[in-house]
Amino acid sequence: MSQLISHGSVGDFLEKNRSYLLKREAQNNLILGICENLKQKPRNELDHFLSVEYNGEIMAVLIKTSPKAVLSATTYQEKDILLLCRYFEAKDDKPVAVLAETLYADLFARSFNEVSRVKTRLMLHQLTEKPESRDTFQKFGAAGEGDIDQLSNFLLAYEFDTEHVSRLDISTARTIVKQQVDEHRLFVWRDAGAIVSMAAILRRTPNFCAIGNVYTPGNLRGKGYGRSCVNELSRYVIDQGYAGCVLFSDLSNPVSGHIYNEIGYRPVSEFCEVSFNQQDAF
């Protein structure tokens, strides 16, 4: 019989489920990265770290550390996902959305007693071979303190492009960008000395880095700036000793997926974000 386990801390969750997550490290980069970032922080009472086991074997895991939940599963049994749904149906802080591989996002949506809609379909890509450099004139580099204001505005614009509404204010965006700069995780491509594109290392797992926040202003697109920035950041990650990189592309924008494929990224798995909150749909 399947059993749902609610873990008392992120440390306990990782101790019990790390091996399961690492078996599909690329697909589980989001859960692994979020949990690693939370290990040194006080437990938020609204956080949930769940797993479903059958005869001692892990079938699914789910974390909710924000209004949204992230689910990873390998089960073939709908009842295992139903256990997770029933858990939240008894709570006041239900997730407003769930992100998972498409099969399991759809299954969660069908089992969850809430009205749902597909918000975003994503493709996870993985790169394991170092691409050739495109940086003949050394236009790629780490962002610095003097770039924070401009890149904070880039981040706001990126949020608007991807979410169709920016959920950040300029102060929050600046805090995020400053942390990324301080931790040497934010990189830029320059043309004639001016920043024309950015990309960030969002998460690190034992063997991969997840790249994201790839943004080029609309009036500068079509010139290969974003591609060059991602290309060089991917080279940088592999030079740091990682086995490779992962990143997501929006399936509604096939151009980005094509560009990543040209760099050397290969599709791994399709993901889907399903929203349960009608206000979150806009």
Image: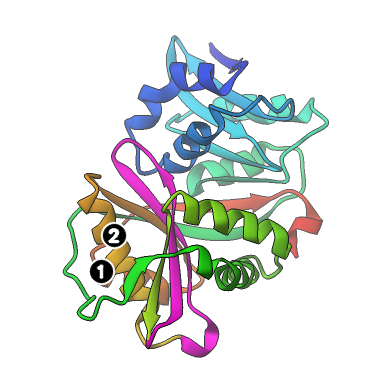
Q: Is residue 22 magenta?
A: no
Q: Nearer the viewer, residue 70 or 131?
A: 131
Q: Is residue 263 left or right of residue 32?
A: left
Q: Amino acid at mark 2?
A: Ser
Query: Which residue, as the protein is rendered here, is positioned at the far front?
Result: 146
Percent coordinates x, y for residue 20 in the rendering: 38, 25
Q: Is residue 177 visible?
A: yes
Where does the magenta region start and end? 192-220
Q: Is residue 63 left or right of residue 265?
A: right
Q: Is residue 214 magenta?
A: yes
* Real-space CA distance between mark 1 and mark 2, rounded to the nearest whole angstrom: 9 Å
- Which residue is identified by label 1? 263
Is the residue 133 above or below the residue 11 in the image? below
Q: Nearer the viewer, residue 143 or 73?
A: 143
Q: Amino acid at mark 1?
A: Ile
Label 1: element kind = helix
Percent coordinates x, y for residue 259 in the rendering: 33, 74
Q: Residues within 10 Å of mark 2 (few under 14, many from 20)?
A: many
Quick check: marks 1 and 2 in contact, CB under 8 Å?
Answer: yes
- Which residue is identified by label 2? 234
Percent coordinates x, y for residue 49 in the rendering: 60, 25
